[in-house]
Amino acid sequence: MTATLIDGKAFAARLRQGIAGQVDAMRARGITPGLAVVLVGEDPASQVYVRAKGKQTREVGMTSFEHRLPADTSERDLLALIGRLNDDPAVNGILVQLPLPEHMDEAAIINAVDPAKDVDGFHILNVGLLATGQKAMVPCTPLGCLMMLRDHLGDLSGRRAVVVGRSNIVGKPMAQLLLRDSATVTIAHSRTQDLPSLCREADILVAAVGRPGFVKGDWIKPGATVIDVGINRTPDGLVGDVDFEAARAVAGAITPVPGGVGPMTIACLLANTLTATARKNDLPDPEGLTP
Ligand SMILES: Nc1nc2c(c(=O)[nH]1)N[C@@H](CN(C=O)c1ccc(C(=O)N[C@@H](CCC(=O)O)C(=O)O)cc1)CN2
Ligand SMILES: [Mg+2]
């Protein structure tokens, strides 16, 4: 038996359709959500993502503000731009595309964004709110993973989840979200001992290490749900962190790369922009878009 494919591309398209409907309703009340995306430098992958973000923002009826700055922009100038966006009432969401050039202090930039406009959920305040179970802005990639897991599995309570990877963008917030849904969560990383055995205990396995085909088929518990967050460019094309062909013969369900987690990341960015706009205007959180 081969695993069910969790189609992130189709899921994201449905999500955007729902968001477009909610944007229409907001615009009828005179409120147009606005998202500002800031790109520093010419990283080719980042350029692709930023272009896709602008296009999808406009397609759901929101206003897109795009700021492209040269790679040698000073931290001071970037902070000044963020300050102007923080003060701009037409901007409800601000995203600074990562990675930033080497000379920039990433934490200082992230923490300069108004937490209420922090649609990436990376600001220290939102990290703390999420960790303590309070209303936060939630990072887009883990939010998308959670939506797919709930859609496929229903209640996550009591399930054993292993998150491989401890980044601030994916691994840590993913673990927080799973914990919030009462899963039993382990975060594994490069120093974890006997990683294959640990992974074999997982009903839910999330791979976010950034190494092509790192998770092998025989690390997977038969019937497990596997979420592959990896996006690795190799001579064979784009591949995930999971050995897909071997894994799909064992897993119960799996996200493909491309077409799994990636498209959900941008759809959840739009979801967060809608949430930030609703909160700014003292409206209830949009249905189904927050954890
Ligand atoms: N400020 C942020 N920076 C970065 C984030 C983020 O969430 N916030 N995440 C990634 C990049 N990213 C969005 O920014 C992103 C990555 C991948 C995809 C995607 O749709 N991938 C496709 C494949 C597209 C391709 O050919 O590359 C897929 O997986 O099907 C969307 C967004 C790092 N930076
Ligand atoms: Mg991401």
Image (cartoon, rainbow, N blue to C red):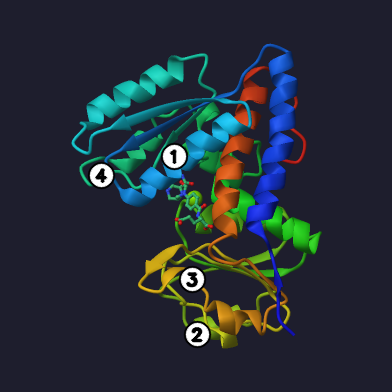
What residue is rendered at 29% in x and 28% in y? 78
**Which residue is more in the foreground, 62 or 208?**
62
**Residues at marks 3 and 1, CA–CA distance in whole angstroms:** 25 Å
Residue type at mark 2: give it.
Answer: Asp
What residue is rendered at 70% in x and 84% in y? 222
**Residues at marks 1 and 2, CA–CA distance in whole angstroms:** 41 Å
Where residue 194 is drawn, which disc sits there? 2
Label 1 sits on a secondary structure element that is helix
Q: Are marks 1 and 4 in contact (CB under 8 Å)?
A: no
In the rendered view, tell whether residue 172 sits above or below residue 212: above
Determine whether, in the image, residue 2 is placed left or right of residue 194: right
**Residues at marks 3 and 4, CA–CA distance in whole angstroms:** 25 Å
**Label 1, residues with CA under 10 Å away: few <14, some 14-19, many ≥20:** few
- Residue 250 figure quarter: bottom right
What residue would you read off at disc 4? 101
What residue would you read off at disc 1? 51
**Residues at marks 2 and 3, CA–CA distance in whole angstroms:** 18 Å
Q: Are marks 1 and 2 in contact (CB under 8 Å)?
A: no
Label 4 sits on a secondary structure element that is loop
What residue would you read off at disc 3? 241
**Label 4, residues with CA under 10 Å away: few <14, some 14-19, many ≥20:** some
Q: Marks 1 and 4: which is nearer the front? A: 1
